């Protein structure tokens, strides 16, 4: 069975379930592990949600809203990304995951969408009744992308409805990557490296849909690439 390394986070269970539901074997990667040991026997790397990447990693001072991730997580995940890319291991990055992936590869982030992007949509719904799998806005998908190929059965005129729980986003896309989905307000919602076997990051939370399968194709495609 193909082992998928999943970076530890506070809401780990939906990521684990999403991998289990497509027939993979999840392994939690904790920042106390050495990178080589963490990736031993792993077929693909999944980067999960969480707090903000330290902006000193892309040369900025922290915005007032900065909320750090767990100590050591930026360093550990950056090292995992470097090692995985050297080996051409498939990478699937979600929410904070796409942000650390972009920064680790040389890109930058919008530190706070509500205060830094005029007219932005509500990307971080916090009303009490908001369910994690409630759809929040659409994204427009580049039709010549891995994301479009995987999601072709759900795309309507190249658009896709997604959930949204983030206050940061990719700003300058890392060299070698392309933005392959944007929200109608211009916020980047997905990036990928077209030269990699499978290297995709999305800003929404497909893992919250494991019960109903709206984004199952992303996990299937990731597992299939990780099994090769
Ligand atoms: Mn969003």
Image: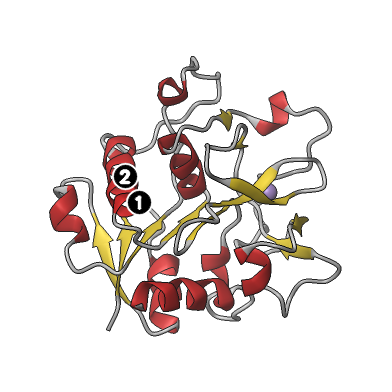
Residue 17 at least partly seen = no
Q: Is mark 2 within 8 Å of ligand 1?
A: no
Compute the Cα span from label 2 to label 1: 5 Å
Where residue 141 appears, as percent x and y from the top left, is 74, 59
Q: Is residue 27 above or below residue 214?
A: above
- Kindly give the residue lying farthest to the top in the view shown: 61
Where residue 166 appears, as percent x and y from the top left, is 60, 44
User: What is the quadrant of the N terminus in the image?
Assistant: bottom left
Residue drawn where x is 70% and y is 25% of the image: 115
Q: Are marks 2 and 1 in contact (CB under 8 Å)?
A: yes
Which residue does the numbered mark 1 point to in the structure image? 85
Residue drawn where x is 44% and y is 41% of the image: 100
Give residue 167's quadrant in the image.
Answer: top right
Residue drawn where x is 57% and y is 59% of the image: 205
**SS at mark 2 in the image:** helix
Where residue 138 appears, as percent x and y from the top left, is 78, 58
Give residue 117's quadrant in the image.
Answer: top right
**SS at mark 1 in the image:** helix
Give residue 19's quadrant in the image.
Answer: bottom left
Q: How many neighbours does mark 2 have within 10 angstroms: few (below 14), some (14-19), or many (20 or more)?
A: some
Near-viewer residue (188 or 165): 188
């Amino acid at each position: 069975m193909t082992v998928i390394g999943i970076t530890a986070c506070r809401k780990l269970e939906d990521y684990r379930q999403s991998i289990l539901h497509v027939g993979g074997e999840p392994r939690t990667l904790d920042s106390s592990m050495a990178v080589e040991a963490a990736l031993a026997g792993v077929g693909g790397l999944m980067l999960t949600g969480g707090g903000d990447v330290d902006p000193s990693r892309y040369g900025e001072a922290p915005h007032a809203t900065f909320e750090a991730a767990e100590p050591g997580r930026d360093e550990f995940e950056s090292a995992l990304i470097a090692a995985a890319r050297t080996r051409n291991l498939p990478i699937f990055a979600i929410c904070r995951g796409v942000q650390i992936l972009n920064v680790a590869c040389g890109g930058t982030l919008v530190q706070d969408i509500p205060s830094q992007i005029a007219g932005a949509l509500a990307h971080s719904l916090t009303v009490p009744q908001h369910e994690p799998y409630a759809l929040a806005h659409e994204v427009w998908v580049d039709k010549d992308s891995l994301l479009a190929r995987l999601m072709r059965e759900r795309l309507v005129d190249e658009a896709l409805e997604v959930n949204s729980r983030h206050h940061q986003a990719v700003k300058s896309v890392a060299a070698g990557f392309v933005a392959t989905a944007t929200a109608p307000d211009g916020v980047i919602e997905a990036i990928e490296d077209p030269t990699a076997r499978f290297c995709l990051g999305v800003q929404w939370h497909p893992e919250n849909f494991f019960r109903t399968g709206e984004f199952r194709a992303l996990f299937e495609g990731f597992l299939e690439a990780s099994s090769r």
